[in-house]
Image (cartoon, helix red, strand yellow):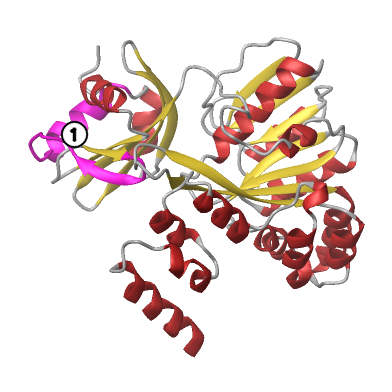
């Protein structure tokens, strides 16, 4: 057993989401969004390097020594499965281990709105799950793939960096390919997938213009494309895609989004009232005729009003959804306040008044700009 497994076993026992290892500080656990040190000595560079190199392949060591970060999946004999990022910084090595549960969760277990199961019934187009790093995008996508796997007969090709949840084929054939191991890039993976008779293509991250263009091509040619973006709202997601592509493709991109973008799910993870877990709260855009016209006519700023009035389609804005969850006592109001867009609407729910001046100062600074 690798020595690093001792820290991973401790984190697993504590129920943490991530284990952080860095030079000059003790190992730390991410517990319900908060970073907490464990009772251990500060790690030296020599010690941490020896821990990390025990679990690296020869190619990974070579890449790390060349100055590149290394992303990979790691499975400990007693500590479970992890998504790992290893990097070098001024004081030496560092690593973050994100725990991947052994069982793929269902959409119901994640308390996701039922409309997400409808998205799994699409036969073509693009469905995006967005949010900041660490908000559970990969978990939501895994639950959607799991739903497809149990309810439809499809060929699903998943492109990930690295592979996180492992999906055994049930009703579907699921082919999981890892960027850097099986394909050179996401764009190359999508290009190859189009020759492999896919029904569904999952793109772990739409991280560059080439990948976005290939994903758009796949969605336009009769495939269902599931993907993620690091954006914090439906409107920002649409604008990010348009801005990511060359200016001469702007009209073509708007045309694609107006017709082939099926839905955007943006999520945040908010603490429960007891502070012992977190719950995903989501903003949902479902592309209908009204939203399609707004995208095509450069009026995306009007989309939030459509989300507010589109409940019959399963749409919802983040702030009203947060307020509903607060009133149902499903989430902590102070933590919800951190994620709210219009914080003034949430001030009446806040119990920790010390956080109010901080956000008031931020709001004042933004208003003055």
Q: Describe the element under mark 1 as helix, strand or loop.
A: helix
Left or right: where 303 falls relative to 91: right
Depth order, front residue of 347/141: 347
Residue 277, image x and y in percent? 39, 37
57 relative to 319 in the view: left or right: left
- Residue 46 falls within the magenta-colored stretch: yes
The answer to which of 363 and 262 lies nearer the viewer is: 363
Q: Quadrant of the rendered structure where residue 37 is? A: top left
Does residue 369 show up? no
| Most distant residue in the left direction | 41
Residue at x 90% of width, y 35% of height: 222
Question: Relative to 227, is 89 above or below?
Answer: below
The answer to whether residue 341 is left or right of residue 71 is right
Residue 271 colored in magenta in the image = no
Assess disc 1: are there few (<14), some (14-19) or many (≥20) residues with their C-alpha within 10 Å of its C-alpha. many
Quadrant position of the N terminus in the picture: top left
Given the current orientation, which residue lies at the most extreme bottom position? 368
In the depicted structure, whether residue 356 falls above or below residue 107 = below
Residue 157: % across, % down: 71, 25
Instruction: Give the image quarter of residue 361.
Output: bottom left
Residue at which label 1 appears = 48
Vertical position of residue 149 compared to residue 335: above or below: above
User: What is the span of residues highlighted in magenta in the rendered image?
Assistant: 31-55
- What residue is shown at x 49% (from left), y 70% (from top)? 343
């Amino acid at each position: 057993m690798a020595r690093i497994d001792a820290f991973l076993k401790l984190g697993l026992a504590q129920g943490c989401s991530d284990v952080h290892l860095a030079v000059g500080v003790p190992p730390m656990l991410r517990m319900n969004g908060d970073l907490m040190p464990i009772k251990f000595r500060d790690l030296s560079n020599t010690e941490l390097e020896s821990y990390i190199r025990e679990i690296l392949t020869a190619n990974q060591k070579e890449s790390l020594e060349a100055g590149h970060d290394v992303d990979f999946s790691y499975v400990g004999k007693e500590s479970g499965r992890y998504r790992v990022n290893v990097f070098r910084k001024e004081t030496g090595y560092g690593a973050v281990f994100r725990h991947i549960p052994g069982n793929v969760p269902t959409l119901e277990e994640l308390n996701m709105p039922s409309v997400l199961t409808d998205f799994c019934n699409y036969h073509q187009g693009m469905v995006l799950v967005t949010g900041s790093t660490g908000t559970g995008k990969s978990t939501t996508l895994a639950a959607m793939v799991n739903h497809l796997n149990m309810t439809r007969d499809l060929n699903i090709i998943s492109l990930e960096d690295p592979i996180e949840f492992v999906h055994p084929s049930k009703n579907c054939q699921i082919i999981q390919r890892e960027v850097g191991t099986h394909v050179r890039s996401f764009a190359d993976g999508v290009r190859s997938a189009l020759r492999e008779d896919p029904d569904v293509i999952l793109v772990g991250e739409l991280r560059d213009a080439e990948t976005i263009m290939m994903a758009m091509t796949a969605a336009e040619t009769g495939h269902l494309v599931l993907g993620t973006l690091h954006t914090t709202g439906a409107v920002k997601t649409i604008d990010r895609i348009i801005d990511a592509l060359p200016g001469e493709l702007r009209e073509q991109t708007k045309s694609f989004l107006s017709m082939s973008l099926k839905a955007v799910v943006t999520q945040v993870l908010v603490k429960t009232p007891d502070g012992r877990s977190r719950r995903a709260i989501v903003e949902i855009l479902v592309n209908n005729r009204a939203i399609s016209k707004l995208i095509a006519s450069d009026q995306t700023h009007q989309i939030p009003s459509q989300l507010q009035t589109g409940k019959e389609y399963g749409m919802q804005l983040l702030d009203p959804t947060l307020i509903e969850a607060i009133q149902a006592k499903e989430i902590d109001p102070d933590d919800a306040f951190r994620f709210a867009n219009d914080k003034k609407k949430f001030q009446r729910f806040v119990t920790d008044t010390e956080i109010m001046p901080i956000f008031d100062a931020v709001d004042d600074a933004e208003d003055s700009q």
